[in-house]
Amino acid sequence: MKMMDHERKLTPAAVLFDRDGTLVVDVPYNGDPELVTPMPGAQQTLERLRSLGLRTGVVTNQSAVALGKIGMDDMRSVNARVEEILGPFDTWQVCPHAPDDGCACRKPRPGLVLAACRDLGVSPKEVVVIGDIGADMTAALRAGARGIMVPSPTTLRREVLDAPAVAGDLWSALTLALGPDMASAAASPDPDSGASAMSSAA
């Protein structure tokens, strides 16, 4: 795990997650709820946050809508499946625009993070954003939130090197976000727990 000195903060009021490649396995342009598969440790990480009374949210780019790959109803069905497997989130912020649309919400712009903070009634300084690519980290930085990267197969090496904090998995990211004392109060999840969580929810 990598963490900069300036990233060592107090317990956050909320933790925001990227969706694809962070909470669930990245299936490009996915509009099929049956293809939703949680990432290892996602369910346990979220359960721990909720048990501590911390707010959780999702901030996700979904350009497939603007590109005509899926419809809004498809996207909503996939998001509903994510909640069915991983439990309810306190806020969902989705950018349905294409990369060239010039919107203010699409990451790496800070719009999604700022909207989530407004919805939750918290300051960006009290928020941690966990994601798998540089756009997630840049959006967090521009919003004034903390960023923690959990690299995925699509993460570029330069993105990892530039990230303010890096964790090998979601549970390790939880330790960075909360500090070892609060995170260690619960056992580290089994590496295969993501698959088992999906099976139990199916």
Image: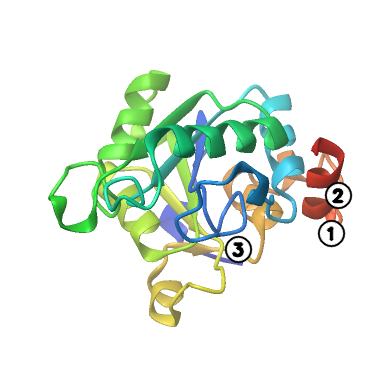
Residue drawn where x is 42% and y is 47% of the image: 146
Horizontally, residue 97 falls left or right of residue 163, namely left
Which of discs 1 and 2 lies nearer the camera? The answer is 2
Residue 133, horizontal then vertical, whole percent: 43, 64
Q: Residue tagged by mark 3?
A: 167
Q: Are marks 2 and 3 in contact (CB under 8 Å)?
A: no
| Residue toward you, 107 or 182 | 107
Q: Residue 93: which numbered mark, if any? A: none
| Residue toward you, 12 or 49 | 49
Which of discs 1 and 3 lies nearer the camera? The answer is 1
Residue 201 occupies which quadrant of the picture? Answer: top right
Q: Residues within 10 Å of mark 1 (few under 14, many from 20)?
A: few
User: Along the polypeptide, which appears first: circle 2 or circle 3?
Assistant: 3
Q: Residue tagged by mark 1?
A: 192
Residue 85, horizontal then vertical, whole percent: 71, 36
Label 2 sits on a secondary structure element that is helix
Label 3 sits on a secondary structure element that is loop
| Residue toward you, 4 or 171 | 171
- 25 vs 113: above or below: below
| Residue toward you, 53 or 24 | 24
Looking at the image, can residue 9 be seen?
yes
Residue 102, horizontal then vertical, whole percent: 12, 50
Q: Residue 196: which numbered mark, if any? A: 2
